Image: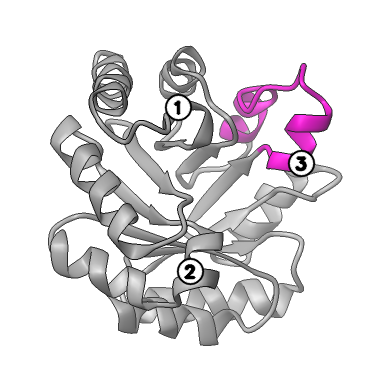
Amino acid sequence: MACAVQISLDLHDIDDALHVADIAVAAGVDWLEAGTGLMVEQGMGVVRALRQRFPAHPIVCDFKVCDGGAYFAKLAVAAGATHFDVMAAAHDATLVRAATVAREHGLVAIADIMFCDDPVAAAVRAERLGVQMIGWHLGLDHRQQHTHLRAIDGLADVLNAVSIPVQVVGGLSIDDAITAARLGAASVVIGGPLVPADRGQQLAETLRAVVQGIKSV
C-alpha cells in the first residue's frame, strides 16, 4: 500500500486553512488534517468547510481524545471526517469505545502513542483493543526540548510489533518523511517545519517535493 501524505492545518482561521489546503491538494497531498488548535479556535465548522471544499479527500480530526471516545467519534462522523485520534494512554474503555463507534460508522480511530513510557507495548495494546491505526508521534514540546530526537527514531520497532497501519508525525523533514515511507509507514504528516509562512509558491514547492519523494519510494 502506498504511503499517504497528510498536511496538518495548524492554523487559526478557516479561510487560511482552506487556502493552505487548496495549495496542498494541488501539490498532491492525500489527507487533510484539522489541527487541534484550529478546531479549538473554530470548532467543527472547519471540518465541515474542508469536507465541502474537498468532498473526496480523507479528513482527520486531531482531537487528541483522552475520554469520551464514542462521543468524539460521532462528532467526527457528523462533520464529515474520515479519521480521528485518541490517546493511547487513555483508559481501555476509551480506546474500545472509540474503535467500536469508528467501525460502526466507517471511521478510522488512530491511537496516538505520544506520552506512553513504552510506545511499542502501547501500540500492541491499542491494536488489541480494536483501534484501526497507530499514530507514532513525537510531540512538539518534547522535540523542542530534545532537539536530537527524530520522529523516525524507533519507528521500525512499532511497525514490526503491529499489523495495523502506522502513521508518523512530529516535525518531519523531507528526508525523514521519505525514510518513514520506506520503512513501511502508511501515512506521514507534514506540519510546521515544512509549512512556510509565505502560504504561496514556497509552500507549493515544498509540498510537491514531499509528495514526489514519498511516491517514488
Type of amino acid at the residue the image marks with label 1: Leu
Under circle 3, the secondary element is helix
Q: Any mark on residue 141, and which? A: 3
The answer to whether marks 2 and 1 mark residues whose Cβ atoms lie closer than 8 Å is no
Q: Earlier in the sequence, mark 2 or mark 3?
A: 2
Reading the chain from its start, which is encountered first: label 1 or label 3? 3
Of residues 200 and 181, the one drawn nearer to the viewer in this rendering: 200
Residue closest to the eye, 116 or 174 = 174
Left or right, 89 with respect to 176, comes to: right
Q: Is residue 71 magenta?
A: no
Write the residue at 32% across / 21% down: 206
Residue labelled with disc 2:
39
Q: Residues within 10 Å of mark 1 (few under 14, many from 20)?
A: some
Give the residue furthest to the front: 198
Q: Position of residue 108 (x, y in %)?
A: 40, 63
CA separation, marks 1 and 3? 17 Å
Is 165 situated left or right of 201 in this image?
right
Q: Is residue 139 above or below residue 33?
A: above
Give the spatial CA distance, label 2 vs label 3.
Answer: 19 Å
* Residue contact between numbered discs 2 and 3, judged by CB atoms under 8 Å: no
In terms of sequence position, does the residue under pointer 2 or pointer 1 come before the other? 2
Distance Cα–Cα, label 2 vs label 1 = 21 Å
Regarding mark 1 in the picture, which secondary structure is present there?
Answer: helix
* Amino acid at circle 3: Asp
* Amino acid at the residue labelled 2: Met
Residues drawn in magenta: 138-160
Specify few, some or many for label 3: CA neighbours under 10 Å numbering under 14, 14-19, or 20 or more.
few
Disc 2 crowd, CA 10 A, few/some/many (<14, 14-19, 20+): many
For image coordinates 52% across by 28% down, the residue present is 193
Residue at 68 percent of width and 37 percent of height: 138
Q: Quadrant of the N terminus?
A: top left
Residue behind mark 1: 194
